[in-house]
Image: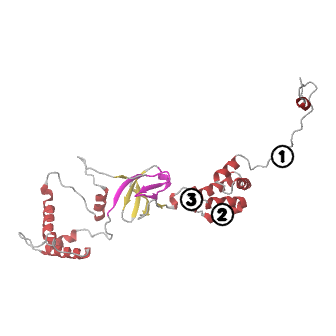
Amino acid sequence: MIFQQVHHKHTKSEIILNRTYQEMAEHYGTAIIPTRVRMPKDKATVEGTVGIISTFILAAIRNDKFFSLSELNEVIKKRLHDYNQKPFQRKEGSRASIFADERQFLLPLPKNIYELSDWRVATVNRGYHVLVDDNYYSVPFEFIKKKVDIRLTRTTVEILYDNNRIASHIRILGKIGGYSTVENHMPHAHQQYIQWNGDKYRARALEIGENTSAVVCSILSSQRVEQQGYKSCHTLLKLGETYSTEELESACERALTYTSTPTLKIVQTIIKSGMTHSTQVQEPKVPSEPSKYSFTRGADYYGKEGNE
């Protein structure tokens, strides 16, 4: 199913952060407390620092030319270091010295760098997959028709239900219509089906008989991609369990007398209609002698001309 974007808004009584922002805060062990509306003094220090950084760093290098991102970052890093070492005008110390005093009370940075993510909501389709950016990712089949949350990063796709992760995939990039399917997500019957391939279908058909083998080979060779015929071959061989392998072989033999490229539908019609059963040839009925009470005109009567 097509995903939908997730939007969050604050209410008068509750602060609701979007999931990406909240995830970043949890990664760094930080609490997000928004400033009050129309209260600029709540963030005066932040706003003032942004302005100073823009002037001290960006304005100073606005006319310089850089030929790589790393070269630009080195210059910004040096300017930022100089700014932090610069003494305060109205009090002792510098920003670097204050940070050295406060550092012992700060939490250590996480070992892993925070990776920006995108959150979406989707409904699991009947084929136990969700559609994300034109590609399909499987979830356990028990969640068919359920709404799930999808967390996208540059390399991974995580699928959650009630805040519990139920599936994780490597993100498919540079492809449209691709599938990432985990075998354990499939129903048991589908797991058996996916383990088969063309060679297994041919070998199993040959065990039943030459005619069944010929039909299976015909189905597989009639497809542009062999895998497209797997479902038909699987259904065909199942007929041997529903009826019997002898009836299946007989139905395939009869189908080959009709066409050199028989299909699953032809074999199904033959075996379901009972045309595989041997029929006894009935002797033509001999006309019985006419009753003495019947009025019968013989051939001589109709052969005479001018009969009145």
- Residue at horizontal 15%, vertical 59%? 43
Residue 120 against residue 55 in the figure, above or below: above
Locate residue 204, reporting x and y percent. 67, 62
Q: Earlier in the sequence, mark 3 or mark 1?
A: 3
Helix or strand or loop: what does disc 3 sit on? helix
Question: Closest to the observer: 48 or 106?
Answer: 48
Locate residue 295, reporting x and y percent. 90, 25
What residue span does the magenta drawing correspond to? 116-144
Q: Quadrant of the C terminus?
A: top right
- Furthest-top residue in this view: 308
Helix or strand or loop: what does disc 1 sit on? loop
- Is residue 119 found inside the magenta-colored segment of the image? yes
Indicate how the structure is coloured in the image: secondary structure
Label 3–label 2 contact, CB within 8 A: no
Label 1–label 2 contact, CB within 8 A: no
In the image, what residue type sits under mark 1? Val
Query: Residue 92 occupies which quadrant of the picture?
Result: bottom left
- Residue at horizontal 18%, vertical 55%? 35
- Furthest-left residue in this view: 90
Q: Is residue 72 left or right of residue 141?
A: left
Q: Which residue is mark 2?
A: 202
Of the numbered discs in the image, which one, if any, rests on residue 166?
Answer: none
Query: Residue 285 occupies which quadrant of the picture?
Result: top right
- Residue at mark 3 to residue at mark 2: CA–CA distance: 15 Å
Locate residue 69, reporting x and y percent. 25, 73
